[in-house]
Amino acid sequence: KAGVTQTPRYLIKTRGQQVTLSCSPISGHRSVSWYQQTPGQGLQFLFEYFSETQRNKGNFPGRFSGRQFSNSRSEMNVSTLELGDSALYLCASSLVGVYEQYFGPGTRLTVT
Amino acid sequence: AQSVTQPDIHITVSEGASLELRCNYSYGATPYLFWYVQSPGQGLQLLLKYFSGDTLVQGIKGFEAEFKRSQSSFNLRKPSVHWSDAAEYFCAVGPKAAGNKLTFGGGTRVLVKP
């Protein structure tokens, strides 16, 4: 069974731009969560989507948003990029009611 | 608010020696507990989990962890370390209510000496 896939793997953007990251969960997994990993703040939860609805949200500004499609694929969007948004963005998926999350390889975003 | 503390930022261990990584958590009730490993440039791989029941849990790659409610700890152990165990290890907690909102510790980087 294929794992969680994330595209693109690497991205370089300029301050003020916006970016969209994509995540395809493991087949059959309907919950998708997003995390931000930085050297300073570590791993932080962004949000979780289930059945196309945001189920949980972390403490991030409104510039960070996401959505989930009917096939469970998810995207996250960051608008008006700041230098501090440079990070590894990880997506994780899980089965309904099974609290084991499987992570993708991440998208490395660099903001210049 | 929940928090997870991994007191050791770096640990260096000789190949073949035992390894113990510490994890303490602060939570209103016993949460779900996890250990993940991250190799350079990779995502996180689930090593093991504790939901309930037996407080000693076995995971992949020869790892085990022990949940101690009285100490709010969930320490990870491996009896004999291999060079391939060099990586960063993260302890995480999640709420028993619906949802997958994990809170992670700061991580412990393990270096393995030959």
Image (cartoon, coloured by chain):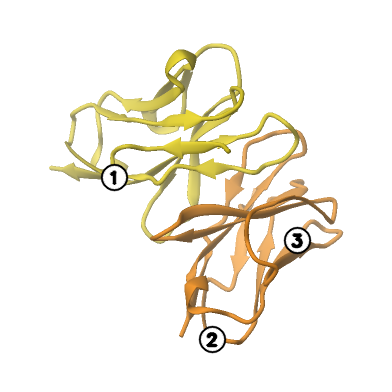
- Residue count near mark 1 (Cα–Cα under 10 Å), binned few <14, some 14–19, many ≥20: few
Q: Nearer the viewer, residue B37 or A17?
A: A17
Q: Chain of mark 1?
A: B
Disc 1 designates what residue?
B9
SS category of the residue bearing label 2:
loop
Q: Which label sits on residue A73? A: 3
Q: Is residue B56 visible?
A: yes
Q: Which chain comes out orange in the rendered image? A: A
The percent coordinates of residue B33 (x first, y second) are: 54, 30
SS category of the residue bearing label 1:
loop
| Residue at the image position 74 percent from the left and 46 percent from the top | A29
Mark nearer the viewer, 1 or 3? 1
User: In the drawing, does residue B32 fall left or right of residue B10?
Assistant: right
Amino acid type, residue under disc 2 in the picture: Arg
Amino acid type, residue under disc 3 in the picture: Arg
Q: Nearer the viewer, residue A102 or B61?
A: A102
Amino acid type, residue under disc 1 in the picture: Ile
Q: Are marks 1 and 3 on the same chain?
A: no
| Residue at the image position 29 percent from the left and 45 percent from the top | B9
Q: Which chain comes out yellow in the rendered image? A: B
